[in-house]
Amino acid sequence: MSDTVIQIAGVTKSFLRGVNAVDDVTLSVARGETLGIVGESGSGKSTLLRMILRLIRPSAGSITLDGRDVWAASGRDLKQARRQMQAVFQDPASSFNPRQSIGAILAAPLEVHGIGDRASRARRIGETLERVGLPATTVSRYPHQLSGGQRQRVAIARAVIMRPAVVLADEPTSALDVSVQAQVLKLFREIKDELGLTSVFVSHNLAVIREVSDRVAVMRHGKLIEIGTAERVFTAPESDYTRALIDAVPDPFRRFRAPVELESGS
Amino acid sequence: MATAAGFDFRRWRLVLLGGLLVGIVLFAAIFAPWVAPYSPFDLDVAKMLQGPSAAHWLGTDELGRDVLSRAIYAARISMQVALLAVTVGLVGGTLIGMTAAYFGGLVEQALMRAMDLLFSFPAILLAVVLMASLGTSVLNAMIAIGIVFIPGFSRLARASTQAVLRQQYIEAARSIGMSDIRIIFREILPNITAPLMVEAAVAFAYAVLLESALSFLGLGAQPPDPSWGNMLSTGRGFMAQAPWLSIVPGMAMFICVLGFNLLGDGLRDVTDPHMRE
């Protein structure tokens, strides 16, 4: 087995009224690979991501990052884990503090982890902005002055400025126009390859998942339906649900094929 | 908010009108020694209870003191009390409200139930009880009125904080490992100031009224220091002979309270995104 970075074992999250948002999920992510998690709204994919990020506490199971239990960590270990793992969030409108300039937003992770002095931070912010394709003058801009695509570039910059080992992305492109989406995805892939990042990429969009993932996990109603290499899952899906999901993607060249019917509602 | 698109007078007219009235009162309070024609303490029994005249525009009181001058100096006390009281209420209430919303659970229950307890007393009764236990002085009036304001500010701060907590930038801040203190002061506080400022303007008006009420009851500013409340209180005895003794401090309070209320309402309209066309 290859070098495992994230190990999720038997993780369950139950909310009130006994509904399991995430139900006994076990999976692992190897170093340098991108795991795409796909599923419809409410499938528990974002909840799973938030549990890895230590934002929502799992009801059962364990999550380890580089062999360290994320939820048992505290103090320096926790800070170390946080530093290793950064996130890109879905909503470009609400994922930045509207009262802070982009410079302040990008400086925050460095300040929190005590990296560098004022000058070296400024240099690093400049380099990172350049890397994500934004002009250096962006530092003095405020989030509302940027477009959705530019904001997601800033979000990627914020995630990689710490040089983390792992980047977790929660639907980072779903609020963007298709053309902008493609650019942001391309950037994400380039940066990921450059820095040798391990990543988990959550999306409801199969095309996006196929574009970025090495392996794909399909979730439904909190359960892991299937997991495998992207190639295998997309060409030879094991479960009916995955097949239905793939068939639901509008494809102008495939319109005469009969759709796969699912027994229980979609 | 005013953008480069030009100044929208209609949107800002309440703020401007309120600001003008508040400005007049503040100007009188700050520059009282230069604005007032006489000392507020100069007695001249020969001239007592004179009606408005060229020498004394708003007449004289039962000890022959110039009513206009006393009303102007009284603005000083009112503004000082209101400023400190609102500061106490704003700072105390904001800290309590943000703490309650941020930590939730038992902390929130304990803090907010304590606030409910304070809130359940009528404001004037609570202020009188606090004054009775703290002792009679202007400083204690400030503290008492400030404590009266804490529950209102804390509820507003809590509700505003809860709204901000749902924003993704809070999750982002947590995920980069930011400390709770830093999240509260750097991420949340700057985003809840607008509603708190509106509330502060309205509280300012209310503080002026409360201070006057306490002074009227003899619990605030002590004679011979002039305060609108104690001027009104003495004027009451001369209502038939010298109505200006009651009318002048009453009008002063009216202008001041109206000014702060207009300012508060205007700021609310200006900062409320739903009111924008």
Image: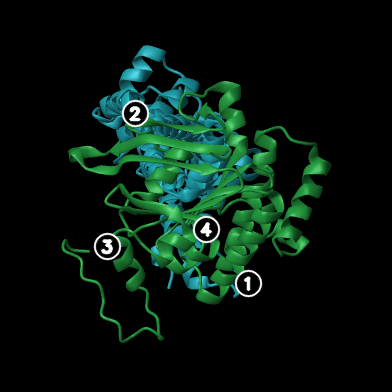
Mark 4 vs mark 1: tell me if same chain: no
Give the residue pinned by disc 1.
Answer: B4
Callout 3 touching callout 1 (CB < 8 Å): no
Instruction: Pinpoint residue A77: horizontal percent, then vertical percent.
Output: 58, 24
Q: Colour of chain B?
A: cyan
Residue A46 appearing in the image: yes
The CA distance from mark 4 to mark 2 is: 43 Å
Instruction: Pinpoint residue A122: horizontal percent, then vertical percent.
Output: 79, 47
Give the residue pinned by disc 4.
Answer: A213
| Kind of element beneath mark 2 | helix
Callout 4 touching callout 1 (CB < 8 Å): no
| Kind of element beneath mark 4 | loop
> Relative to the observer, which residue lies in front, A60 or A118?
A60
Q: Colour of chain A?
A: green
Single out the mark in the foreground, 3 or 4: 3
Q: Chain of mark 4?
A: A
Q: Chain of mark 1?
A: B
Residue name at image x 71 percent, y 61 percent: A138
Residue name at image x 71 percent, y 54 percent: A194
Q: Is A188 located above or below residue B44 in the figure?
A: below
Three-letter amino acid code at the position of disc 2: Glu
Categorize mark 1 by other alpha carbons within 10 Å: few (<14), some (14-19), many (20+): few
In the picture, measured across the screen, residue A82 lies left or right of residue A64, that is right
Instruction: Pinpoint residue A50: horizontal percent, then vertical percent.
Output: 43, 43
Which numbered dot is residue B141? none
| Kind of element beneath mark 3 | helix
